[in-house]
Each structure stands twice: as C-alpha cells, then as structure tokens.
Image (cartoon, rainbow, N blue to C red):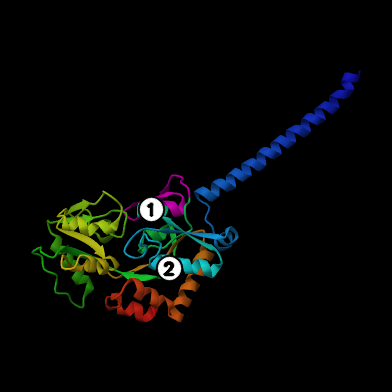
Amino acid sequence: MQQFQRLPIMCENRMRFSIRRVWRSSIAAIVFCVSLGTSLGWAADLKDIQARGEIRHLGIRYANFVTGDGDGFDVDLVRGFAHEIGVRYTLVYTDFYTVLRDLLGHDVVNQNGAVTLTGEFPVRGDMIATGFTVLPWRKQVVLYSDPTFPSQVLLVARAASPYAPIKGSSNLTQDIIETKQLIGGHSLLVMERTCLDPANYDLKGKGLDLRSYIRSTNLNEMVPALLNKEAEFTLLDVPDVILDMQKWAGQIKVLGPISPEQVLAAAFPTGSPELRDAFNRYLRRLREEGDYDKLVDKYYTGVRRYFPAFFKVGG
C-alpha cells in the first residue's frame, strides 16, 4: 500500500525533472539560435552595435581607400564614424571575392544581373567601406550610403604600346564606344567579381580575348601584370589610375573611358537602415565642416580635376 502511496509523488518528481530538462533544453536552443543568427546572418543595426560597443569595418587593401598600414581614406572615414556613434573601431581585412559574404553571411551569385544568396557563413563585419562601387546588382543585396567618392573605369595600356588614346569629345557615350573598339582582338586583363569585372561593362560574350587575373584578388597587382605583358590592355578605375600614374610614372597610359562616371559608397546589410542613416548624417556633417575635403586632399591629390562637379557639390 505504501508503494502505491509513493507512486504519485515519484511521478510528480519525475514530471518536474522532465519539465526542468525541457525548459533548459529550450533555453539552450534559443541561445544557440540567437548565437547562430548573430554569427551567420543577423544584421546588426545601430542600437545593436552601440550595445555591443564595437563596429567592424570590412576593408580591402586597395588604392589608398585601405592602405594595409592601418589608415586610408575609408579607414579614417569609418574610424571617425565609430567615434561619432560612441563605439570601438575594428578593421577587418577581406577581399573582393568574399567581402559580401563577410557582410551578409551568404555568398552572392550574380548571373546576368539576377542575384541569389547561397550558403551559410560567419558574418565578420557590420559595414563595407573600401572604394566599393555602386553597381545595380549589388543594390539588390545591400543598402548603400550616400556617395563617398567618384570613379570611372578606364582602358589602360603600356606607355610603349602602339595604341593611341582616343581624342575624346563632349559625348561620353560615343567616347566609350570608341574606347571599346580599341580592344578589338587584343587581350584584356580583367578581374571578375570586382569593379573591373567585364560583365559590368558589356564586354562579355563579345568575342574579346578576356584574361582573368586569378593569382590573387588584389587589384593593386593589375598594373604590374600589364607591364609583365600578361595582356595588351587592362581596366583600372580613376582612384587607382591616379596612384598608379605616380608609382609607374612614364610606364602606362590611359586610352579612354569604359564606363560612365560612377560613385563609390559604404554598404550595409538590408537589415541595418538606422546604421546607414547614421552614417549618412555623419558624412553630411563632414562635408559641411570641411573635414571630408581634408581626407580627399590627404589621400587623392589631383582627383578634383577628374570630377569637378562631384567635389563642387560634395565640398
């Protein structure tokens, strides 16, 4: 009889134990899911970053935007933004092939302008600022800030090559057509999945001799490869050309434009609109107070003559 009297007590104790175990498992699962979301695809907005006390800046060593020595146009820009919102600044180095994955937690596949997200990867940064060109397909997966810098893609050759620059005119569209005609059957050095991807400028599927540079993802290596005669021509954007014309003085020449004028901007996950908006407010203040102009002069002396309208408006 005592055994039957003890049975309800034993069952009640076991039930309590089972409930506690389920509760603990549920809490663990919730913690795991939150942790997984943060590491894989959880976009941190302004309040999240301020609560964390740190903003992670995804930067690529490229054309004085990120020098690799702890400074650069975009490094200084984002470091100031970190101070503006009251958090610690951390620079996270990446490359053009993985930068969107590091921001979004997914690989971005672009096929003729149709963009899909694939895979699951750790999120390594909260924003991209690295001379990042605003391109239509990228706008499908990120929020861009207001323009931070102007650019344009140009056709470049060795100075000793027999190809002459186009005469140029007031009609940019015609100048681009004429520049593209120079390529003809000659070889063109390109780097896919970057601002120098030929698909961005209607150069694929045209029967051109396109030679993808694959030894690294460093755009700073394009001119050395050109001088090493790995192709007759290469593509470069204006910020890179400004520096390369100084570094390789007398060894390269610009033949003409491949693209219309472009803009560069910082990029944020689509789930971080408040962070993007805070950056825009910060950028506007820098322009109004003249600190933006100081950054331009520090890293890109002479760029104003290429884009007078941009800097007139911006400054």
| Residue under pointer 1 | 115
Above or below, comparing residue 268 to residue 32 in the picture:
below
Question: Left of 35 or right of it: where is 287?
Answer: left
- Location of the N terminus (image quadrant): top right
Question: Left of 48 or right of it: where is 19?
Answer: right
Kindly identify the amino acid type of the residue bearing the numbered disc 2. Asp
Point out residue 11 in the picture as x, y percentages from the top left corner: 81, 27
Q: Nearer the viewer, residue 130 or 163?
A: 130
Which image quadrant is residue 313 in? bottom left
| Residue under pointer 2 | 76
Residues packed near mark 1 inside 10 Å, few (<14), some (14 to 19) or many (20 plus): some
Identity of the residue drawn at 48% across and 48% down:
122
Point out residue 233 in the picture as x, y percentages from the top left corner: 17, 59
Kindly identify the amino acid type of the residue bearing the numbered disc 1. Val
Identity of the residue drawn at 21% across and 78% down:
170
Q: Quick check: is 291 in the magenta stretch?
A: no
- Location of the C terminus (image quadrant): bottom left
Point out residue 75 in the picture as x, y percentages from the top left corner: 42, 65
The magenta stretch is 101-122
Which image quadrant is residue 177 in? bottom left
Point out residue 37 in the picture as x, y percentages from the top left corner: 54, 48
* Of callouts 1 and 2, the N-terminal one: 2
Above or below, comparing residue 254 to residue 119 in the picture:
below
Count the numbered circles shown: 2
Query: Can residue 99 be seen by looking at this rendering?
Result: yes
